[in-house]
Image (cartoon, rainbow, N blue to C red):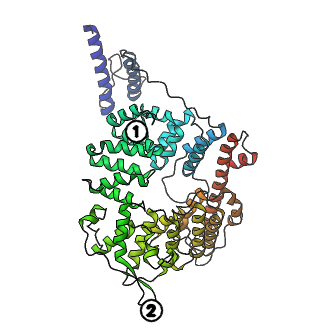
Amino acid sequence: MNRTSALAETSASGVWEDLVTTALLGTDRRPAASASGSTGAGPAREAPVALLDAAAVETVRRRAGLRPARAARRPDRAPADPRPALPAAAGRRLALLLADRPGTGGGRRGTSPDLMELLPQWLAAANAHGFAAPPESLPALLDAARGRTDLRPAALAFAGPRALWLARLNPDWRFALRAAPGGGATLPDPDDADEVERLWQEGLFAERVALLTAIRTHRPAAARELLAGTWATERAEDRLMFLDSLRTGLGIEDEPFLEQTLADRSRNVRATAAELLSALPDSALAARMAVRAGACVALDRTRDAPTIVVEAPLECDTRMERDGVAAKPPAGRGERSWWLGQLVEAAPLGTWPGRLGGRTPQDIVALPVADDWQAELHAAWCRAAVRQRDPVWARALLGAPSAPEAGGPGAVSLAERAKLLGTLCAAERAEWVAGFIATHGLSEAFQLLGVCAVPWAAPLGRAVVDALNIARDAGSYPWSFSGVMGLAERCLDPVEAGRLDGLLAVPDEREDASPGAGGYWAEAFQRLMTTLRLRAVMADELDAARHGRAPSATAAGRGG
């Protein structure tokens, strides 16, 4: 830069600083300087206008005077997405869903559907059809996934490889790289032994976890052998994550390796290994736990009726600890009941019919338990049924949905009932929850509804609608059912919309009803029906392209 250029740059910088100073102080205290360096607004110009004119001129001058810099390296081309393109109608629907933003003011929602809450369902359907995301929708899709972690798996699957390409260019979307297996890295073919070994030895932690998970899915033994080869040199926190990957394809062939990890230096690793072994009923650990638990639980036939008696462990020895029993109980729990629960939870459920007189699980849970041990014993059986995925024991512990207090003997909480329901098939879950609602209403059903398959089966959908109608007619406080109503909007089968026509009118309010309750119920049912019809349109827009037809005219007319 020569001396003249330097002086010119210094002068231009000084003019800009003068303009900034004038703007801060105000033109009534300091006259505006023009781009040429003169001051004053002139007879026909007011000082603030002159200041803005001078700033505009100086801005153009500063931009025009920028020196060219070396161009940045052009990014690689975005990868191709081989999936079929999203149909035009579905693409427009996606744009509408992504443009919706939930309100922040609270209060009543009106009759309009909450589009953002329908986005997860739309993404699941689009992924099931195998469509590719429109390129123009990717920024909005990534922004939505950035704000809602529950959207990320489905959103990233729909966005495809271009989402990772964009994430490398925009720091706001880096979460996509963290969420992708291996941080978005390309994994080698599981059959390419050399590349697999190289990545396992040299890769980043996320890449190694993704590699182990991918191989475990297709070749469980190969993944276990890969892990065993470097186990002794892995960090404790890494060993825990690697060990957790063995849940996929877990089998009795994994027992020797898991038995070795029971002696691991990390307590968390030992506990995870013990949990995995206890899920294998034929493992040596399961047999050891059966012996220990069986020594604590027996059948007393000397009483008027056969009764289960419990003698909890007196100590937690080193062998129990090695097999995953935690010696120190949480606050508020007694040591002996804590140890008993862990032993019964880890023992194979097949232990108990032979131990308790050849009875079935239903007969066993119906037996009385002496000395107030029933809650502890049955809660442990609940956890065992969930861990071992045993539907027979789950049914016995759930009991009839119409039972008093809505539960079987072992269902000590709604959370445990929900977990037990998870071991049953979708149709059986829906039937049980429908019976629960028919008997006990909706006040405690929200958590149970959350484990039912979507869309809800017809009996469950009818039970929910009928219970909402009963609550309305009873003058119940309407806002207490807003959670269930929101679930119904997302989970009811759209064919149920026709059953709502009779619920749209504002009912006559009872004297003991909440003020305005009738209007709220009518508004909520109107929103429910509108949402169901919109979901039907969304499904039709995706199905039509799959079957090579245009969306139905009826659906298009209801879509809004």
Residue plotted at (40% across, 38% down) = 182
**Image check: 395 left or right of 49?**
right
Whole-percent x, y for residue 49 in the image: 41, 27
Instruction: Give the residue drawn at x 35%, y 48%.
Output: 241
Marks 2/1: CA–CA distance: 63 Å
- Which of the numbered marks, if any, corresponds to residue 304? 2
- Whether residue 440 is situated above or below residue 151 in the rendered picture: below
Q: Kindly report which numbered mark, 2 or 1, lies closer to the viewer in this rendering.
A: 2
Q: Residues within 10 Å of mark 1 (few under 14, many from 20)?
A: some
Instruction: Residue under label 1, please give it.
Output: 182
Q: Which sits in the foreground, 41 or 131?
A: 131
Identify which residue is drawn at 59% across, 45% down.
Answer: 128
Q: Which mark is residue 515?
A: none
Amino acid type at image mark 1: Gly
Q: Give the SS element for disc 1.
A: helix
Q: Residues within 10 Å of mark 2 (few under 14, many from 20)?
A: few
Mark 2 element type: loop
- Above or below for 37 versus 183: above
| Residue at screen point 34% across, 76% down | 296
Q: How many tags in the picture?
A: 2
Q: Amino acid at mark 2?
A: Asp
Q: Look at the picture and state if 82 lies above or below 559.
A: above
Residue 64 in the image, given as x and y percentages of width and height: 40, 16
Please indicate, yes or no, whether residue 260 appears anywhere in the rendered image.
yes
Q: With 446 as the anchor, is 14 left or right in this view?
A: left
Confirm whether residue 560 shows in the render.
no
